[in-house]
Amino acid sequence: MRAAVQAKNTFSDGVVTGKLLYIWAALSKLRAVPYGRPFQMKKQSLATKTKAELLKIAQRLGLRGITTLKKETLANKIASAKQQKKSNSKRHVIGAAIKKATEMVRRRAIRKRPGTAKPVVAPPPKIARKPKAAASGEKAVSPADAGALAAHKFDVTPKAKPPKRKFADESLGDLPESYGTGKLFLVARDPNWLYAYWDLTNQQMADARKRASDGRLLLRLFEKNVAVPLQELTLSHDARNWYISGVRASTTYQAQIGFWRRDGQFHVIGASRETTTPSAVVSTDTSARFATIPVDVPFEELLSIIRSYSPGGEKLADVLHRLQIQGAPFPFTVGVEIGPWTEEQAAVIERELGGDVLRRRQTGSLELSEWLRRRLEENVSSGGLGSASV
């Protein structure tokens, strides 16, 4: 018996010693690898990639400040980062193995100490449970009750409502720079400027430049009903949007993004919808329309009231204005007098709110509303508001 135990201990010590020798050899190999020097094979494979592909690889490795680097410098930086990541992985694996082998040696040394063996405790005997006896006061089930129970034994108990799910903040990462749909959008910024942006990835734009006869990706602007492009702009490699100047007010435009093929045809990657620039002059429509829109009536109920009076395509305020002028019945009080101001009403407003109220033509509606509210509060608090009806 003693010889068998001694042989088992010798075998365990041999296993531990073998693991330690393996870890030592791995550490020697790790020290032999020069730190921070990229492999030649990695550098050759990276040199065949485009700068856009290298930028995408660098972003996955978590590198920062790489946009302005040259292609060769960027490839060296990526290779160094990959080599460092691989060295860190090796150190982590070997460190875990060293820790495990050290723990095995420590436990083996503790077991070899005299007087440290734990006494073997026999498990407690299992006690057979007796079935519970029926309570002395339990009543026997009558045949009628048994029939009623049998009639409902297949009834399904309604399931309990599931607990309300609490909001959990999920770490979904950053949004991508592009989804690669190839769509082009064109909007008017003001009467003389347009703004265009497109949904293309760096790889898609790089592929388009490779297929182009002159290596350029172009943005072309067309005026409506004119076949010749008004402008043809060369896009830079990192451009994702563009401001276009030199357009006219109240004019409709459309844009295309694409490249010239080697056969002389223009290949369209994406085309925008038509957009019209706003007018550069003040509108000549000076008419004013007033309508009462109740805040206490639900919007769906208000729509159901006026649906039979609207031919379709007419705005809600325009329908209410027209119906209130015609005297249509409404389930709410129309508190605004409909119609143009009389000379007496205009004179009262000019007298009470100031002579410049009718001359504020270059002011926005929000600013004018705030200005009127302050003047009314001043007049009401000072008692200067007249009793004339407006």
Image (cartoon, helix red, strand yellow):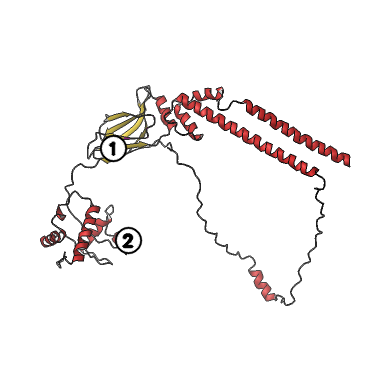
149 relative to 301, above or below: below
The number of discs equals 2
Q: Horizontal and vertical percent for residue 39?
A: 56, 24
Q: Nearer the viewer, residue 35 or 341?
A: 35
Question: Mark 2 or 1 closer to N-term?
Answer: 1
Q: Residues within 10 Å of mark 1 (few under 14, many from 20)?
A: many
Quadrant housing the N terminus: top right
Quarter of the view holding residue 277: top left
Q: Which residues are magenta?
A: 236-242
Relative to residue 73, is residue 121 drawn left or right?
right
Quarter of the view holding residue 390: bottom left
Name the residue tied to disc 2. Answer: 304
Task: Indicate whether residue 241 is drawn in magenta.
Answer: yes
| The residue positioned farthest toward the front in the image shown | 114
Secondary structure type for disc 2: helix
Q: Horizontal and vertical percent for residue 300?
A: 34, 60
The disc placed on residue 194 is: 1
Secondary structure type for disc 1: strand
Residue type at the position of mark 1: Leu
Relative to residue 142, is residue 39 drawn left or right?
left
Quarter of the view holding residue 323: bottom left
Spatial CA distance of label 2 from label 1 is 41 Å
Task: Indicate whether residue 265 is drawn in magenta.
Answer: no
Residue 229 visible to an observer of this rendering: no
Relative to residue 123, is residue 312 drawn left or right?
left
